[in-house]
Amino acid sequence: MNDQEKIQNEIEKTLGMFDKKESLPPNPYIYTRIQQRLNEKTKKEFSIFSVLKPAFFTALIAINLTTAIWYTSSDSSIVSTDTDQELVDILKSDFNLESEQTENLIFE
């Protein structure tokens, strides 16, 4: 008997076990155990986190709305410039820079 035949015999023996399987006797207390686990899960869910979830969600929505309103209202404060010198002058006045400090602001 070579290796291939041994392997084939083992496969057939293993697959034959599925045909001869024995049914397990049913557990009469399985329904009670399942009900108990479900009740334990519902008791665990009521905690401080279940109370904080709606509060966190409400705070998140409020922050989101505040940010959206701030973003849309800040468009009027944007200054557009036509030349680089105008931009340098605006930056100089915003940051209170001296003339020697603005040499690096010249854009090329």
Image (cartoon, rainbow, N blue to C red):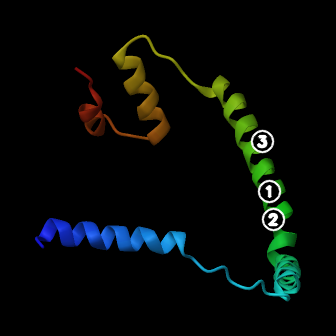
* Quadrant that contains the C terminus: top left
- Chain-order first, disc 1 or disc 3: 1
Q: Residue 18 in the image: state x and y as whole percent.
A: 51, 70
The foreground one among 69 and 43 is: 43
Category of crowding for the residue at label 2, using alpha-carbon neighbours closer than 10 angstroms: few (below 14), some (14–19), many (at least 20): few
Spatial CA span between label 1 and label 3: 12 Å
Category of crowding for the residue at label 3, using alpha-carbon neighbours closer than 10 angstroms: few (below 14), some (14–19), many (at least 20): few
Per the image, label 2 sits on a secondary structure element best described as helix
Amino acid type at mark 1: Phe
C-beta proximity under 8 Å, tags 3 and 2: no
Per the image, label 1 sits on a secondary structure element best described as helix
Amino acid type at mark 3: Leu
Q: Read off the residue under disc 3.
A: 65
* Quadrant that contains the N terminus: bottom left
Per the image, label 3 sits on a secondary structure element best described as helix
Q: Read off the residue under disc 2.
A: 53
Spatial CA span between label 3 and label 2: 18 Å
Q: Residue 20 in the image: state x and y as whole percent.
A: 54, 75
For the point 67% across and 34% down, the residue is 71
C-beta proximity under 8 Å, tags 1 and 2: yes
Q: Quadrant of residue 79?
A: top right
User: In this rendering, would 37 be left or right of 78?
Assistant: right
Q: Read off the residue under disc 1.
A: 57
Amino acid type at mark 2: Lys
For the point 45% across and 41% down, the residue is 95
